[in-house]
Amino acid sequence: RRHRSTYRPSGSHGFRLPVQCSSLAAPSAGGVRLPTRPRPSRFQLGGSAAHLMRRSIHILSGLLPFVYYHFLALIPQHLVISGPQLISAIIMINILIEAIRLRFRVILPGHRDYERMQPSSLAWGLLSMCMVILVVPGGSAYAIPIILGYALVDPLLGECRFRKMSVTKVRIIGIIALSTIWLLSSYFIGTLWWFFLFMAPITLAAEHPNLKYVDDNAMMQLIPLAICLILAPWLGMM
């Protein structure tokens, strides 16, 4: 008895490979259907709508320092809670909610799958913003450009990478965007103008490392905050 082969002829090309899962197969120019990997989704839950929500929250978070310095910071100290106390309370509530979420390994629309096991980028971003507002020397003149650099430039760089731009183009766009933020801050709110010379590249470099537990939402704010704290005694910013 002739042995029956699992390969079947395909026209003049002789044979074609067996496909175990037709839903993952894609045709090629030679008439051969090869299995292909499904395109991974960017988020565990929510898809494109969650991606848009995530980006929107990221950008709108840049309003926090304006709300604080124009309204919350002006709350009289003798009332129930002052502006700094409110920011401190937000930090504690943020940590508590994130601890509960991690305890039960919950992810919400917009969360990435790995955030089931580690602090989310949203929690890192909110914590870092509040830390900047609480302790940055020089007040709004330095808190606003630090937070805007995170809120606006980080999603901009993410979209550039998603569109397969080269590393050089992404870096150039990042430097231009961050420099613009710091220069506009010097014009409108009195930030030292020459800070853009080192804050732009430092913030861009802080966004690059892919650390396991610390999100770039924190790195882009806490490292510039540390630079301000180091320079403050020399510049009379304390």
Image: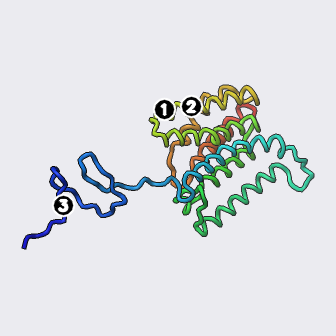
The residue under the point 15% across, 50% down is 12
Q: In this view, does 24 lie to the left or right of 33?
A: right
Give how far across and how far down residue 154 sits, in percent: 58, 41
CA separation, marks 1 and 2?
10 Å
- Secondary structure at numbered mark 3: strand
CA separation, marks 2 and 3?
57 Å
- Secondary structure at numbered mark 1: helix
Give how far across and how far down residue 194 sits, in percent: 65, 26
Disc 3 packing (10 Å; few <14; some 14–19; many ≥20): few
Give the number of the disc on residue 8: 3
- Secondary structure at numbered mark 2: helix
Q: Which amino acid does label 2 sit on?
A: Ile
Give how far across and how far down residue 199 sits, in percent: 61, 33
Task: Give the residue number, with chain letter if any, for mark 2.
Answer: 175
Foreground label between 2 and 3: 3
The residue under the point 56% across, 52% down is 214
| Viewer-side residue, 178 vs 137 | 178
